[in-house]
Image (cartoon, grey):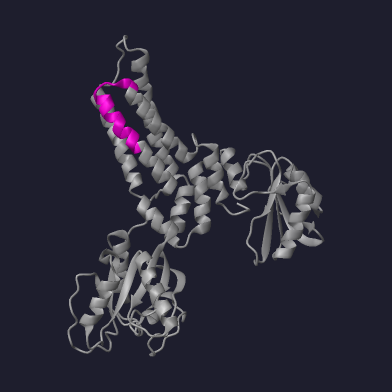
Amino acid sequence: MNTVDTICAICTGTGGAISIIRISGPGALNTGAAVWRGRQALGLATARQMLLGKCCGDPALAVYMPAPHSYTGDDIVEIHCHGGALTARRVLNAALGAGARPAEPGEFTFRAFINEKLDLVQAEAVSDIIGAHSQMALNLAQRQIAGRLSAQISALRDELVQLLAETESRLDFGDEHLDWQPPEEICARLGAVLERAAGLIATFAAGLILREGIRVVLAGRPNAGKSSLLNLLLGQDRAIVSRIPGTTRDTIEESTHLRNIPVRLTDTAGIRSADDHVERLGIDRSRSTIESAQVVIWLLDATSPCPEEEIREMNAACRNPARVIAAWNKIDQAGEHPLPELSLPTARISATENLGIDGLLDLFEQMVWGHEHAEEPEVAVNARHHALLQEAANALAEAIPCTAAEQWELAAAAMRQAITALGAITGETVDPDILENIFAKFCIGK
């Protein structure tokens, strides 16, 4: 992506009441003036004022935002027209005909990064805001775009730059006996940076959960109440509920969030021996889905005359019990007879009467976070940040013993590697090919 062309794109989704066409670059004002007309002309005299006029024969609003005080740091003109794919496309085509070219995915934010309006962490947070599936994920992305993570990364890098300067001065002026810090003090400061980097690395798991969600599978025998629980958790009648065994013959998937955790919730066909060919296919798919799940909620029928048989089937189907929650369902119908104790996290619920669901969700939350009622993370790194922080941590782990042994050249090399890795997180030292890959994942118009 270059930064000299004038680019344009529709930056709103289809189907809304208003569509926004964004034009950015050195020719934005001329392009906007060529396709939009109003009583007042777009220009410095009307900068940042929303003006009423017409574009392609339809009423439209336009606003001019001169550089450098714009989202991209370049001149920007935005045209706000009636919603709908056809209206927006007509305006876009007019802008293209006036000299602009189509923006590539993420190109507006790429220019914001190049023009130092955002660092790379903040630019990635733009994509996270668009893709947020829960309030907690949205709050995290907003903190990232506000610079919370960037500030911590920059502080680590600044500390290492100071330590590297002292280390390299020993190489350049080794015979002059300057007032250097003792090696043990430098080691302590390097250790503190390593500890803070490790703390950021530890946030990766929470970030992965909030950004990508959790695959949750509802499993069990036919008529255990899986579809009833699915409908209850979704708050709508998504799956057919029937007393006839084998009603669900295929997996049913829906996205939702449980305890502010984004989840992909899957209802599966009941696990049993079946003669029907279609039902057997559904059961085979259920077994495969259980294997790939991050959390399995296995429903056991509390009214079953042989609950031990249900437990044996659960144990046979779930090869990794560490990610299984057992739920005795239909407790409202179970009477007084005791249920077998299980070594797994166990809830007692009624999906039809909405009983015990909070207890089940407590167990789910504890399994996901490792404890109940997780607080929102202040920052959480993504996979790219995690890899670079790990690279920096490994380099620091090499630098500390070299510093203790006064092997200053080796220590300096390791510090430089850590500084480069941290700089790549915020974009100060990142490779251009990596930049292209990051912004290519954005949608067009951002």
Magenta stretch: includes residue 398: yes
Q: Residue 22: where, in percent of width, then height?
A: 68, 51
Pick the front one: 143 or 422:
422
Res 349 → quadrant? bottom left
Q: Residue 307: where, in percent of width, then height?
A: 22, 83
Report the side of 349 relative to 117 (left or right).
left
Magenta stretch: includes residue 325: no
Res 313 → quadrant? bottom left
Can residue 377 be seen here? The reply is: no
Residue shown at 29%/34% (left/top)?
A: 397
Examine the residues drawn in magenta and state their main secondary structure: helix
Q: Quadrant of the N terminus?
A: top right
Report the side of 312 relative to 13 (left or right).
left
Which range of residues does the magenta coloring cover? Answer: 393-409
Can residue 304 be seen here? The reply is: yes
Residue shown at 79%/52% (left/top)?
A: 35
